[in-house]
Image (cartoon, rainbow, N blue to C red):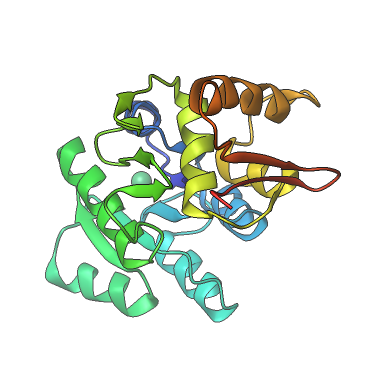
Amino acid sequence: MRLLLVEDEKELAKPLKEGLEYQKYAVDLAFDGQDGERLARENNYDVIILDIMLPQKDGISITKSLRADGISTPILMLTAKGTVEDKTVGLDAGADDYLPKPFAFGELSARVRALLRRAGTEKKPVLQVADLQLDPATHDVIRAGKDIELVKKDFQLLEYLMRNADRVLTRAEIEEHVWDRNAELWSDVIRSHIKTLRAKIDKGHKTKLIKTIHGVGYKISAK
Ligand code: CA
């Protein structure tokens, strides 16, 4: 799951980014409205967390212009202003939810999960492909009753594959959804993570779930 965070207060933005990354989201960060809007247009995010008061372009204007262009990514608005009026303006502009500052990190992360669920990207609480299960909430990965330990990137990659089970995902799609824009992707990075996943998920099992579609990408499937 890939998130965009647009927040000009660096002392708030940086810990938020870290907290969300700790929860295994890939997070891009923009410190002003112009950069934030550009990123929102260029990339395919699962949720945008958008401050209202921003240099260059405010969150309400960004929301309006994204919605006017048919970009329907769920938006969670943040603001220091917490009046009913501001809330209405944000939601009327096309935001999906609204969180007044100051807020507890746990509340932000619960709202993000709710938006992901609403968007249908978190359809089932536990993802399952054959005897492999992944729980996005607890980060538990289990195959045939045995716990599997995965580092963050391997977990994110497996989650993305499992959310799109039986569908071939191109390298470009995987890159876009699993890595953030500052990640340095050497040409074999995806292959190397797939190799690790195979060793952890498929090794010792008769049915290999992770498939390579040569020249295209990868998919996870029991078939
Ligand atoms: Ca601000």
Q: Is residue 71 left or right of residue 46?
A: right
Hey, which quadrant is residue 81 in on the image? bottom left
Count of numbered labels shown in the rendering: 0
Measuring from the top left, give residue 5's x and y in whole percent. Answer: 44, 44
Front residue of this view, candidates 63 and 207: 207
Q: In the picture shown, does residue 206 fall above or below 168?
A: above
Residue sitting at x 39%, y 62%: 75
Can residue 170 be seen here? yes
Q: Residue furthest right?
A: 215
Can residue 30 be seen here? no
Measuring from the top left, give residue 93's x and y in whole percent. Answer: 38, 76
Residue sitting at x 50%, y 65%: 62
Residue sitting at x 31%, y 70%: 90
Hey, which quadrant is residue 208 in on the image? top right
Measuring from the top left, give residue 60's x and y in whole percent. Answer: 40, 67
Front residue of this view, candidates 178 and 218: 218
Measuring from the top left, give residue 111's x and y in whole percent. Answer: 23, 53
Q: In the picture shown, does residue 151 fall above or below 121?
A: above
Residue sitting at x 35%, y 32%: 144
Front residue of this view, candidates 115 and 34: 115
